[in-house]
Amino acid sequence: MSVPLETACVAVRLRAERLHVRHPGIDRDAVRDVSLAVRSGEILALVGPNGSGKSTLLGSLGRDLALRRGEVFYGEMPVRRWPRRRLARRLARLPQDPQSPEGLTVDDLVRAGRHPHVGGFAPLGDRDRRALEEALAAVELADLRDRPLEALSGGERRRAFLAMALAQEPECLLLDEPTAALDLRHQLELLALLERLNRERGTTIALSIHDLEHAARIADRIAVLSRGRIYAVGPPAEVLTGETLLDVFRVDARVDADDRGLRIRVLGPGDPIRSF
């Protein structure tokens, strides 16, 4: 299956050009010859089986992984040439398993999201405090602001790190499996929050996500990855087809569309002879 990468002349916030990325100690590329544009003001979902390169691609876009070949641009400038603090005012990335020093409270963590704006030791101004309060309220953690991170559940920790990213007030958010460790209610609330950020603030969002129906519900476009390459990219209804699910995910499925999005009914495993 082949879907054009770009079909319209639109403003591009972040783009990858012919990326090859290899993790240390591994003798093959995890991402191979990938070109992808994240359009300004859109929500772009990355989907694919485990090991398809979603996390690697997001890490490369966020300048957290070295490129073996290719280039990543934020606006018209290569990401590698942006001063880190200046880039952090525009671009925030939440990895799949974020880590923090021991002993931090929720409030400490979220305050760290203001460092690109005020520096590590400068006091917070009115705008900084407002951004902090809005971020905590958005993820429903204001009542837990003084609690140590170690005392939180996995889902609460996940929301605390998201609040830190929101406190940066970025133009662009890169989120690696943001719904991981969240129960169904908080998954849906988080997706609704991302939609509001996108609609009300114009925040550009690229996220990886396993639930294909959730991806179709939230995303303007979906990029399907398979074995480190782009298999297809485009509107959800164009790329999340029975053919895609069979070729990439190796499952036989029926895909139906209604007013609320796509409905995917898995009928069974696909033909094992058809590899992706």
Image (cartoon, helix red, strand yellow):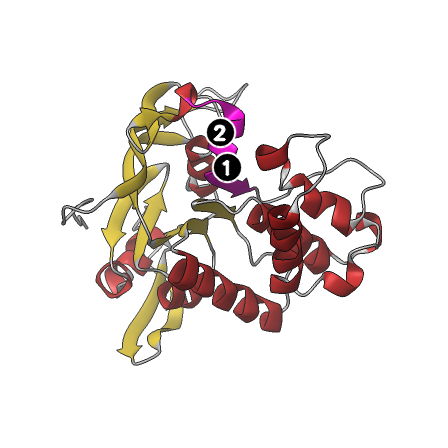
In this picture, residue 169 sits left or right of residue 269: right
In this picture, residue 128 sits left or right of residue 151: left
> Pointer 1: what residue?
89
Number of residues whose C-alpha sits closer than 10 Å to that of mark 2, classed few (under 14), some (14–19) or many (20 or more): few
Q: Are marks 2 and 1 in contact (CB under 8 Å)?
A: yes
Q: Is residue 13 visible?
A: yes
Picture residue at 82% right of the left edge, 38% below the top: 102
Question: Gap between marks 2 and 1, in whole Å?
Answer: 5 Å
Q: Position of residue 92 (x, y in %)?
A: 51, 41
- Residue 246 in the image: above or below residue 40: below
Picture residue at 60% right of the left edge, 52% below the top: 131
What residue range appears in magenta?
Answer: 82-94
Q: Nearer the viewer, residue 222 or 226?
A: 222
- At mark 2, the secondary structure is helix
Residue at the far bottom: name it. 259
- Give the number of the disc on residue 4: none
Residue at the far front: name it. 126
* Residue type indicated by callout 1: Arg
* Residue type indicated by callout 2: Arg
Q: Quadrant of residue 78?
A: top left
Q: Quadrant of residue 98?
A: top right
Picture residue at 62% right of the left edge, 56% below the top: 135
Magenta stretch contains residue 91: yes
- Residue 218 in the image: above or below residue 169: below
Q: Position of residue 138 (x, y in %)?
A: 60, 63
In this picture, residue 179 sits left or right of residue 8: right
Q: Position of residue 254 (x, y in %)?
A: 30, 73
- Give the number of the disc on residue 86: 2
